[in-house]
Image (cartoon, grey):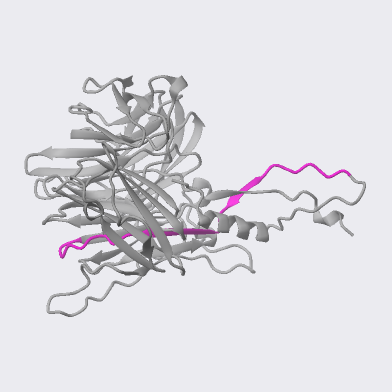
């Protein structure tokens, strides 16, 4: 997916104006001065979109909104934008009108009232939470500005204790974009997979949805030119988009012809449970899928090659003690334009781990997208979550809504040993932030299950920042057991792009007469 969003472009434009960015020609006969290297400055505006959390009558949703402190410190934030000429910083989500016909009506025929705009952040460094229960909770869209924009993140966590959508559904609300890949979706009879398209802007967007099964494109006349009205959301059931036979593993490609959307897939399996499928990282020849729980009872790898060349992939498990080749599958051949899947039973064997895919022959590398379907529990007491391939944390990344019990951070270094700084923020209801430097050995995954703010009340955010060494990939598992069911969800850490490169002026304005 193209991660350089329009929000960041807008931020760069605003920064250029604020910092006096200009490009001027040298006077006649004078040599043009050499352009200075671009400067990285904090973004001044960031946007996010959260889909409709659930249509279940018994759903309970918690939103957690958070902006990390600039510089990654633990000192209390002063908040607000600096400079008398700048408006006060804001970070707020507002309901988006839904075009769905499901939900929204309370018992007795009365229209349910949507909740107020939740989780409005007023200062960096402290999470803010809000609840929205039942089927009337709408999709949300919003923006952060000023000091609250760099690294702004929102976590949407929903508990559905019963029914066909039973499970713990977690999602880090995403930035609007124009291109998304979702491996590990399905049109199988036991699955109800909805792709949610949320338009945060004041103008309409038009989206296309392509489905790819094991034999290639799943033909349909309903996937092109899907209108998404301004400030609204459109849920689309994948199985209704094609008349071809049901497929257990499908790759979904969402693009926009005009405008931009936030996109995520809500997956409900009548036997296994439910969760959100977040977008995979951009196609690349190497993929890392971090944070497989130690007690996973079933893991399915799904991969897709969007290019013209087939991919032969080496499968490796990065464990706490080193990198190994799983006995259940050593490699995977993925044909161009087709979805490939392989089951990996008994994969983790009691250790938190991460999966790494790389070309079997480095000279024949082909870009892929990938995701895992992970199951915990057995029999009737099972729960499912999805882990997409993710990029390394290059500057900083945050996942909000962590709890005192049931939170495990997984850090994976695949190229070289690395050190990262991990900060557990203050709690939403109180507590003192804590920072810890963690060393991750080359080719290993390190589990951090016990980093909790002192005197924690409520939920907290975890922020990861590289310190030295190689690339680090990260994921957070949140486990909330309920009546014997090991409910859980996994969110990967996506670099927050809290800064943007601003070209320096070619010539100092002060030299002009």
Rendered location of residue 17, percent (x, y): 67, 60
- Res. 107 in view: yes
Rendered location of residue 248, percent (x, y): 20, 41
Quarter occupied by residue 236 = bottom left
- Res. 121 in view: no
Q: Residue at x 33, y 72 (%)?
A: 116
Q: Is residue 31 above or below residue 67?
A: above
Quarter occupied by residue 51 = bottom left
Residue that protrudes farthest toward the left in the picture: 379
Q: Residue at x 90, y 46 (%)?
A: 30
In the image, residue 416 lies in the stretch drawn in magenta: no
Quarter of the C terminus within the rendering: bottom right
As drawn, is 10 to the left or to the right of 36? left
Q: Over which residues does the magenta segment extend?
A: 31-59
Quarter of the N terminus within the rendering: top left
Quarter occupied by residue 18 = bottom right
Q: How many marks?
A: 0
Q: Residue at x 48, y 66 (%)?
A: 90
Q: Nearer the viewer, residue 234 or 505?
A: 234
Residue that protrudes farthest toward the right in the picture: 29
In the image, residue 46 lies in the stretch drawn in magenta: yes
Rendered location of residue 28, percent (x, y): 91, 50
As drawn, is 283 to the left or to the right of 481? right
Q: Nearer the viewer, residue 164 or 119?
A: 164
């Amino acid at each position: 997916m193209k991660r350089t969003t329009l929000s960041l472009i807008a931020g760069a434009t605003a920064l250029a104006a604020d910092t006096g960015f200009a490009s001027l020609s040298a006077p006649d006969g004078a040599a043009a001065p050499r352009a200075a290297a671009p400067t990285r400055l904090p973004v001044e505006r960031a946007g996010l979109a959260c889909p409709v959390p659930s249509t279940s009558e018994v759903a309970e949703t918690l939103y957690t909104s958070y902006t990390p402190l600039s510089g990654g410190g633990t000192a209390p934030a002063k908040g607000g934008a600096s400079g008398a000429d700048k408006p006060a910083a804001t970070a707020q989500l507002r309901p988006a009108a839904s075009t769905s016909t499901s939900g929204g009506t309370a018992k007795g025929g009365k229209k349910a009232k949507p909740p107020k705009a939740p989780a409005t952040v007023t200062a960096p460094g402290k999470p803010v939470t809000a609840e929205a229960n039942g089927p009337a909770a709408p999709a949300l869209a919003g923006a952060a500005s000023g000091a609250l924009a760099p690294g702004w993140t929102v976590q949407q966590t929903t508990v559905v204790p019963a029914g066909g959508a039973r499970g713990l559904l977690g999602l880090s609300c995403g930035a609007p974009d124009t291109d998304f890949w979702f491996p590990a979706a399905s049109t199988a009879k036991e699955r109800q997979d909805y792709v949610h398209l949320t338009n945060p802007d004041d103008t309409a967007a038009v989206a296309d949805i392509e489905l790819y099964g094991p034999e290639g494109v799943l033909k349909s006349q309903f996937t092109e030119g899907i209108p998404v009205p301004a400030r609204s959301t459109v849920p689309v059931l994948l199985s209704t988009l094609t008349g071809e036979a049901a497929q257990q593993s499908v790759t979904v490609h969402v693009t926009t012809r005009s405008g931009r959307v936030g996109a995520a897939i809500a997956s409900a399996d009548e036997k296994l449970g439910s969760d959100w499928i977040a977008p995979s990282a951009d196609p690349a020849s190497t993929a890392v899928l971090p944070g497989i729980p130690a007690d996973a009872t079933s893991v399915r790898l799904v991969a897709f090659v969007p290019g013209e060349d087939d991919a032969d992939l080496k499968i490796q498990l990065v464990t706490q003690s080193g990198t190994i080749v799983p006995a259940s599958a050593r490699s995977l051949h993925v044909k161009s334009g087709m979805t490939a899947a392989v089951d990996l039973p008994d994969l983790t064997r009691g250790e938190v781990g991460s999966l790494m895919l790389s070309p079997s022959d480095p000279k024949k590398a082909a870009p892929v997208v990938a995701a895992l379907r992970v199951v915990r529990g057995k029999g009737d007491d099972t729960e499912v979550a999805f882990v997409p391939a993710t990029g390394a944390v290059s500057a900083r990344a945050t996942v909000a809504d962590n709890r005192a019990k049931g939170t495990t951070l997984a850090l994976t270094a695949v190229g070289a040993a690395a050190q990262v700084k991990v900060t557990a923020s203050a709690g939403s209801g109180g507590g003192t932030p804590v920072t810890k430097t963690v060393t991750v050995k080359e080719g290993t995954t390190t589990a951090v299950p016990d980093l909790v703010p002192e005197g924690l009340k409520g939920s907290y955010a975890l922020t990861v920042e590289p310190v030295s060494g190689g690339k680090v990939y990260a994921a957070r598992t949140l486990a909330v057991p309920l009546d014997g069911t090991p409910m859980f969800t996994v969110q990967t850490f996506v670099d927050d792009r809290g800064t943007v490169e601003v070209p320096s002026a070619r010539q100092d304005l002060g030299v002009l007469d």
